Image (spheres, rainbow, N blue to C red):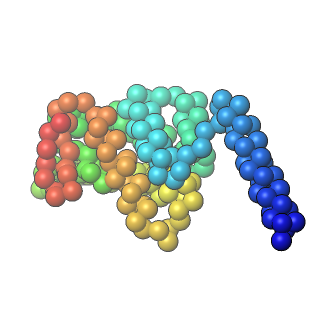
Amino acid sequence: MSNQFSIAARKTRRRLLGVCAAALLLSACGSTSIHSGAGGTKIEAQQVVALVYAQAPDSEIEKLLYSGGDLTRAIRRLRDRYPQLKPWLDQGVIGNTANGLVTLRDAALRDAALRDLVSKENRDRTLLYRETSNAVGQDDEHPNWLAYVSFSFGSEWIGQGPAGWWWMNEKREWLQK
């Protein structure tokens, strides 16, 4: 019985030493960072919105935690479209929503070009959220995760926007920042 105990104790000690060695190796790598899906999503939202608002070059987009393919193309289109959206946001004609989209503050507005601009923006934002969800390992079968992603980005679009911009909360109430 004591022989079995000492064998089990040695195995446990080896596992523990292996885990400690792995932890030490990871801590020695200063550039290594580990993010959960939720943490990575929040970081990605902060960085993407900052890059879009700052009109960052492509080289900065490629440094994102999650990038490549459709995700990078969507971010570039959002960045490139922002100068067209900004005057409308500044005037309060459109605003960001808590769930990460943009919308007209006056639904009766009939400006076809503006409606098309808003539609294109929302199409790319939706693609961005879906691709970000996929990048953290959550596929289309997890609609709650996609909602989390869109609200994480929504919080950033609103929070990083300048004072005076309008935004719609979850109760569909318009508020001015």
Residue 39 visible in this rendered orientation of the protein: yes
| 175 relative to 99, above or below | above
> How far from the left and from the top, in percent, is residue 53?
37, 32
Residue 107 picture location, percent across and down:
15, 56
Q: Residue at x 13, y 44 (%)?
A: 175
Going by the image, does 97 lie left or right of 1? left
Residue visible at 48% across and 43% down? Answer: 44
Task: From the viewer's perspective, tell me whether residue 126 is left or right of residue 69.
Answer: left
Q: Is residue 126 left or right of residue 134?
A: left
Q: How many marks?
A: 0
Q: Which of 9 and 129 is in front in this view?
A: 9
Residue 77 appears in view:
no
In the depicted structure, whether residue 68 falls above or below residue 161: below
In the picture, the quarter occupied by the C terminus is top left
Q: Quarter of the image containing the N terminus?
A: bottom right
Question: Between residues 144 and 51, which one lies in front from this camera angle?
Answer: 144
Q: Measuring 67% from the left and 34% from the top, which residue is drawn there?
A: 27
Front residue of 14/111: it is 14
Where is residue 98? Give x, y as percent: 26, 51
**Image quarter for residue 72?**
top right
Residue that extends furthest to the front in the rendered view of this protein: 2
Q: Farthest right residue?
A: 3
Q: Where is residue 112 in the image (x, y as percent from the top left)?
A: 24, 52
